[in-house]
Image (tube, rainbow, N blue to C red):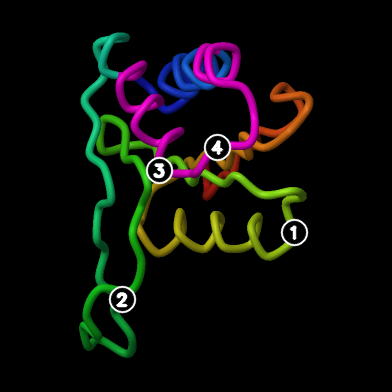
Amino acid sequence: MSENDISFKIRGAIFNVYNKLGPGLLESVYESALAYELIKEGLKIERQVSLPIVYDGTELGAGFRIDILVEKLVLIEIKSVDTLADIHHKQTLTYVRLSGLRLGVLVNFNTANILSSRYRKVNQL
């Protein structure tokens, strides 16, 4: 399955979670529900995946956590904030690049319109 195929299933799962739960909950609630939906879709997922930062050839330890890693190919960064800031987009793209992946999905569940609150972040895809 390609990153684009996985992304399609992720978008559907995000839509299902939002329609069932609505906005205003904690990120951890959306993470649990989204993980459940993705597993129902037959996807292999990992939650809160720690990735080390390698700087100048030296591993500096865990640098960040991926909220959900899908099929070891696509990461999902979950937010539940009033407004996504530029830093959220930059953070997600940096996570994609540092992880060596080619695709990430940023989603903000605290919104009136989930269709305009999910974004693909691409690294050489």
- Where residue 4 sits: x, y (%)? 48, 22
Reading the chain from its start, which is encountered first: label 3 or label 2? Answer: 3
Type of the residue with mark 2:
Ile
Which amino acid, by three-letter code, is at mark 4? Leu
The residue carrying pointer 4 sits among few (fewer than 14), some (14 to 19) or many (20 or more) residues within 10 Å by Cα, namely few
Task: Tally the marks.
Answer: 4
Task: Read off the residue under disc 4.
Answer: 25
Residue appearing at x 36%, y 52% in the figure: 66
Mark 4 to mark 2 CA distance (whole Å): 30 Å
Report if residue 30 lies within the magenta region: yes
Circle nearer the N terminus (1, 4): 4
> Can you identify the residue that label 3 sits on?
28
Task: Check the picture and name the quadrant holding the N terminus.
Answer: top left
- Position above or below: 10 against 97: above
Q: Position of residue 73 (x, y in %)?
A: 33, 37
Q: Are marks 4 and 2 in contact (CB under 8 Å)?
A: no
Tell me which label, 2 or 1, sits earlier in the chain.
2
Q: Label 3 sits on what residue type?
A: Ser
Task: Looking at the picture, tell me which residue is in the foreground, 122 or 17.
Answer: 17
Distance of label 3 from label 4 (alpha carbons): 8 Å
Q: Which mark is residue 53?
A: 2
Element carrying mark 4? loop
Q: Secondary structure at mark 3?
A: helix
- Cα separation, mark 2 vs mark 1, equals 24 Å
Task: Answer with the quarter of the image where residue 36 lies.
Answer: top left
Between marks 2 and 1 in the image, the one whose residue lies nearer the viewer? 1
The secondary structure that dominates the magenta segment is: helix
- Asked which secondary structure carries label 1, the reply is loop
